[in-house]
Amino acid sequence: MATFTQLASGNWRVQVRRKTRYVAETFRRRKDGEEWALEMERNIDRNGSPRPRALRNIRAFGDLIDLHDEDSVATPEPTEPSS
């Protein structure tokens, strides 16, 4: 769910917290913020990251950790052979 806060400047601060992810952005119009928040929530639900997987580049150590977390969830644990 997104949180909308109107700043003293008249701009809107939009915060999205979903599945332990947090992203925030500032917009001049609330409607722009609502559209952005909906897109971020959908991206998080689809691939666990606020950014679309195809467009994401690793630029910081945190991005590398996020990628590792996604890969470890997507990879099943090996099972021991039955004897």
Image (spheres, rainbow, N blue to C red):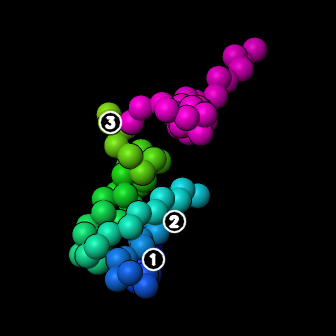
Instruction: Give the residue pinned by disc 2.
Output: 17
Q: Which residues are magenta?
A: 56-83
- Residue 58 highlighted magenta (yes or no): yes
Q: Earlier in the sequence, mark 2 or mark 3?
A: 2
Disc 2 packing (10 Å; few <14; some 14–19; many ≥20) = some
Residue 55's tag is 3
- Residue 76 highlighted magenta (yes or no): yes
Would residue 59 be found to the left or right of residue 82 on screen?
Answer: left
Residue 22's tag is none
Name the image quarter holding residue 29.
bottom left
Tell me whether the residue at label 2 lies in contact with that at label 3, contact meaning CB atoms closer than 8 angstroms.
no
Tell me whether the residue at label 2 lies in contact with that at label 1, contact meaning CB atoms closer than 8 angstroms.
yes
Q: Residue at x 69, y 16 (%)?
A: 81
Rounded to the nearest whole Å, what is the CA distance between mark 2 and mark 1? 8 Å
Would residue 31 be found to the left or right of residue 55 on screen?
Answer: left
Residue at the outermost right position: 83
Q: Residue at x 28, y 73 (%)?
A: 28
**Which structural element holds mark 1?**
strand
Amino acid type, mark 3: Leu
Residue 3's tag is 1
Tell me whether the residue at label 3 lies in contact with that at label 1, contact meaning CB atoms closer than 8 angstroms.
no
